[in-house]
Amino acid sequence: MDGYIHSIESFGTVDGPGVRMVIFLQGCPMRCLYCHNPDTWEPAQGAKMSAEDILRQYDRNRAFYAHGGLTVTGGEPLLQTDFLLELFALAKERGIHTCIDTSGITFAASDPACREKLDRLLQMTDLVLLDIKHADSACHKKLTGHDNAPVLAFARHLAERQLPVWIRHVLVPGYTDGEEHLRTLGRLIASLSNVKAIDVLPYHTMGVAKYETLGLSYPLSGLDAATAADAARAKQIILAAFRESR
Ligand code: SF4
């Protein structure tokens, strides 16, 4: 089958360990106010590519990926789980390190068919980058349009499976940078026994031009970007709460 691919980055260095081929998949049900990839939102758009097409491209640069691998991101890659099952099966046949960068929003704990399919994919996944947008459900909804219950259920599901996870959190001034929230997030992460790293990413405004191109108004117009120093301070608060509750 074909996947709907927004774009491919051949030499990604921030989406998992080492140098990686990063596949941006099309489609996302979330509407994060700060999203810098609104052009990935619509499903069934972009280029149609098969798993073989992608791995042929991977093989051309294989020497660069010796300590890296393949990361799928988006958009929300788990909207295309059937395609990922094919892609990761072929990747594993070649011994490739596989990583999923996801918000976890599609996790349906009460749907056995969905869980069975997801678990098959997770068996072929070496690392999950889990983006926790906000620790508080009401604030998560304000920020993304969705409750965070599926995200937290997915985080617990990954912990039960002891699948390595890197937590990612975007620091958005006035939305996710409150000290109490960061401490809550630290305690939440401490409750998960499979977390190997925590990344706090400063909010930036580089996606604004895409909204103009798409004829959309930018929801956070006028909000200044966060700095690397802001993100470092926030990470210290998260880590302090993390250590206190361990
Ligand atoms: S989950 Fe990612 S792609 Fe989807 S709206 Fe949020 S930031 Fe954008």
Image: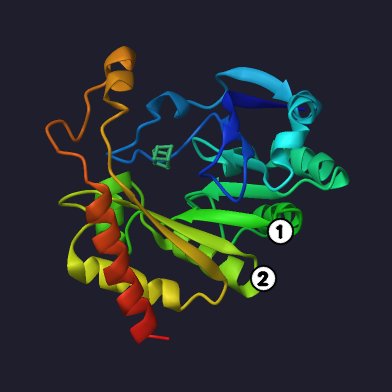
- In this view, 82 is above or below 190: above
Residue corresponding to mark 2: 161
The amino acid at mark 1 is: Asp
Q: Earlier in the sequence, mark 1 or mark 2?
A: 1
Q: Could you give the CA–CA distance between mark 1 and mark 2, rounded to whole angstroms?
A: 9 Å
Instruction: Name the quarter where the C terminus is drawn.
Output: bottom left
Residue picked out by circle 1: 119
**Which residue is drawn at the image coordinates 80% and 25% (left, top)?**
56
Three-letter amino acid code at the position of disc 2 = Arg
From the viewer's perspective, is residue 120 above or below residue 237? above
Residue found farthest to the left: 222
The local crowd at label 2, few if under 14, some if 14 to 19, many if 20 or more residues have their Cα within 10 Å, is few
- Give the total number of marks visible in the rendering: 2
Task: Kindly report which numbered mark, 1 or 2, lies closer to the viewer in this rendering.
Answer: 2
Residue 1 place in picture, x, y as percent: 77, 28
State the image quarter where residue 80 is shown: top right
The residue at 40%/30% (across/down) is: 37
